[in-house]
Amino acid sequence: MAIPESTPDLLTLATWRPEQFTRCTNPGFEVDTTGWAVTAGATITRITTDSHTGAACAQVVTDDTDGSGVTFDLGSDRYLADAAHATLYVARFWLRRISGGRRLVVTLGSAGTPEDRASLVIDDLSDVWREYAVSWRPSADRTDAELVIATGDASVGTFHLDDVSIYSPLSSQVEDGHFETDTTGWDIGASHIAGVATSLTRITAEAFGGDACAELVTTATSGSGADYAFGTRRFLAGRTYRLRVGLKRMSGATQARLRLGSVGTAADRGDATVTLTDAWAWHTVDWTPSADRTDVALAISNASAAALTVRLDEAEVYEALDQVTVRELTTERGSMSGAAEATARASASSSAAEPVDATTQRPSPSIAATVG
Ligand SMILES: [Ca+2]
Ligand SMILES: [Ca+2]
């Protein structure tokens, strides 16, 4: 099966900006230290006498116990393994040593499965603010991820932490939009935006891309369909996001409804009715959030009170912008907007980050000591 054409427009691709799609709900300590826990005798305090950005950062004082540090529990948010597409998750954060030891071990991964964690060992923690990164490819779908920043040498010390982002740098935020392995992440039980559907089944008889797609059978109630929720990841006000999906009508109604937006605020969604064909074709809906949202889902449903059987594949959600940013490389297309300039600046300033590729993915004991 040929790879689908990049229609409607190659000029509208994703940018990878850490501050959006982040799953860290308290990245900058501007209000408090909510969400952060301490391990092995450490303390965490919000201070306003220093920061990387904003008015505050966290001051962490470690104890003389190996593994002393801080943890951010990512709750039950799902992190998907995907052998076909190698889903990657990255934690980026800024650190500054104030006193004591210079060695930290940063771990991102499963709390319950030590084999499924990635670690970054910092041996020379900087005395000035510096960005570090650790990247993780889950070996199985996980709903118990954590980020741990802790000592690796049982040394008393003090460091400052700010601007934490935990996100997937892949262009599409729909990790399982291609159905090559399963339908994990998709729901037909009216849990989010769409109403209850009859079935969503992985099909290998054909595909828009790869070797499989999914077939959705709706009920005769309008709005019946499948949806895919984005957990706690953040969609930012004023930016434009796009749902793009390949659809092929099999039987029943001739139109479908695409929605992308807030689960809890129905007025803040992109909503489009599209006319289906009996051959694969791309369909899209755009959404510009009216406020920052952390309760976002997409939905593909019927558009009227008539049953529909439709096949879907290659579902993607990304920020629609006329430029492409790949880490430090920004390819400008057309005039640069203010946001695009910010991206370019962020890319330039992140050149001090530890190379993401240098992250080692191996078992680490760090998380074992965590939380409560
Ligand atoms: Ca801050
Ligand atoms: Ca596919």
Image (cartoon, grey):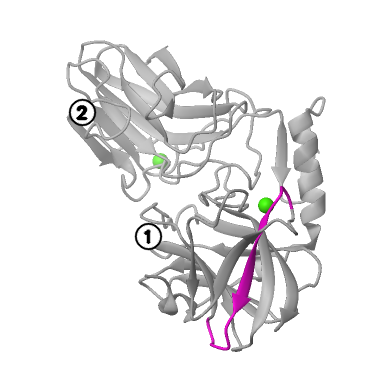
Amino acid type, callout 2: Val
Tell me the chief SS of the magenta region.
loop
In the rendered image, residue 367, in percent from the top left (x then y), is placed at 45, 75
* Residue 196 image label: 2
Amino acid type, callout 1: Arg
Q: Earlier in the sequence, mark 2 or mark 1?
A: 1
Q: As drawn, is 1 to the left or to the right of 327?
A: left
In the rendered image, residue 356, in percent from the top left (x then y), is placed at 66, 63
Element type where label 1 sits in the image: loop
The image quadrant that residue 229 belongs to is: top left
Element type where label 2 sits in the image: loop
| Ligand 2 shown in quarter | top left
Q: Is residue 155 visible?
A: yes
Seen in the picture, residue 114 relative to 140 is either above or below; the reply is: below
In the rendered image, residue 164, in percent from the top left (x then y), is placed at 61, 56
In the rendered image, residue 78, in percent from the top left (x then y), is placed at 39, 52
Q: Is residue 279 visible?
A: no
Seen in the picture, residue 287 relative to 358 is either above or below; the reply is: above
Q: Residues within 10 Å of mark 1 (few under 14, many from 20)?
A: some
* Residue 322 image label: none
Seen in the picture, residue 72 relative to 260 is either above or below; the reply is: below
Which residue is nearer to you in this view: 91 or 115?
A: 91
Q: Please identify the quadrant where the C terminus is shown.
A: bottom left
Task: Determine if the magenta segment contains residue 14.
Answer: no
User: According to the image, label 1 marks what residue?
Assistant: 142
User: Which residue range is magenta in the image?
Assistant: 53-67
**At x 27% / y 26%, what residue is drawn?**
225
**At x 26% / y 35%, what residue is drawn?**
191
